[in-house]
Amino acid sequence: MTSSALDLPPSVRIGPGSGGLTVVRVASSRGSAEVYLHGAQITSWVPAGADPVLWLSAASEFAAGSAIRGGVPICFPWFGPLAGVPSAPKHGFARLVDWTLDDVRADGDDVVLVLVLRDSALTRASAWPHRFEARYTITVGTHLTLSLDVANTGTATFTFEEALHTYLSVGDIGATEVRGLDGAPFADQLRDPQAQPGEAGPVRFTAETDRVYLATAAAATVVDGASARSVTIDKLGSRSTVVWNPWQAKAAAMADFGADEWTQMVCVETCNVKTDAVDLAPGSSHTMSVTLSIDQPLPHQPQNRAT
Ligand code: BG6
């Protein structure tokens, strides 16, 4: 079905967005969102009455064949470079191609979008020759749920990696911590690709950070001290969580990162990567999903002071 054939609820509009790419705009009583067909990438989610939750670089490219820097890129069917194939695009092809909008519907006060990507001559030529169908369901409301279902439509088992590479806005990375990953083994991508034992306590940021936490199904909470807000990331069907901030030098080397933007973002990515990659038999499917919810501060109250 083409998007023009869909019967849209009144809270949904489809039109040109940045760079002329097609964007689906949701504006409901419970929250607003923007989703590009390019990469099936959600670039904005604003729960009603709250500040934007997702970070998007002001310097992002919006162009066919490029990844959008921010929101939630989908990394699939591999994460990082594809082993042994240096010409293959980093983080897979899913974030670089247009997905098809398959369904848009209201679910009570929430809005549900379903986007689909199937193998094509292009994807099969990308060093990943497998037959698949990926269905991505985005539910926009006071919570945001993202659910990626991958089906093996071919005749042989394949292995894939996946990440919902979630960029979150924070007031100040130096006053941010990620809770919930205590004790989970992690591979430090900057030092040693072998997993090392987990650490106690929250993750705090004082330098470039690029960690792949493995064998953890735990929820994580990003505590944004500067904004006095926290974002909880509850996940299902996911065994890995990536935590990333490029810090100053790496961000400065990226054309699609504005100066100092790195101070106001953190990625906490719901994944199945490395030793948590998924083996999928013909006719089988696998679903990974994440729900983001915010713990909003109460309006500022004057403090009682002892005199
Ligand atoms: C993270 C990786 O998930 O994505 C990092 O762990 C990587 O190693 C980052 O630098 C951004 O990748 P890209 O391809 O979007 O610049």
Image (cartoon, rainbow, N blue to C red):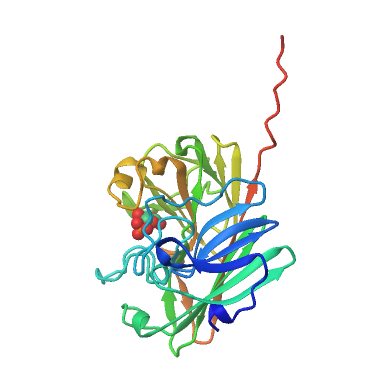
Which quarter of the picture shows residue 120? bottom left
Which image quarter has ligand 1? bottom left
Q: Nearer the viewer, residue 62 or 128?
A: 62
User: Where is residue 5 shown, x and y percent of the image?
Assistant: 58, 82
Q: Compared with residue 80, is residue 98 higher up or lower down, i.e. above or below?
A: below
Q: Which residue is at 35% across, 85% downward?
A: 121
Residue occupying the far right of the picture: 108
Task: Using the rendered view, name the quadrant where residue 98 is placed.
Answer: bottom left
In the rendered image, the quadrant that contains the N terminus is bottom right
Question: Is 23 left or right of 210, judged from the image as shown?
Answer: right
From the top left corner, tell me how far across and down residue 245 is, in percent. 40, 46
Rendered position, 260 above or below 112: above
The residue positioned 31% from the left and 82% from the top of the image is: 125
> Residue at point 69% right, 35% down?
299
Residue 224 in picture, x, y percent from top left: 55, 40
| Screen quadrant of the C terminus | top right
Front-lying residue, 156 or 259 = 259
- x 66%, y 72%: residue: 105
Q: Which percent across, then down, holds residue 38?
A: 44, 69
Toward the bottom, the furthest residue is 155
- Compared to residue 150, the image places residue 168 above or below, namely above
Q: Residue 236: in sight, yes or no?
A: no
Between 37 and 207, the one nearer to me in the picture:
37
Whether residue 188 is visible:
yes
Query: Is residue 186 shown left or right of residue 236?
Result: left
- Number of residue marks: 0
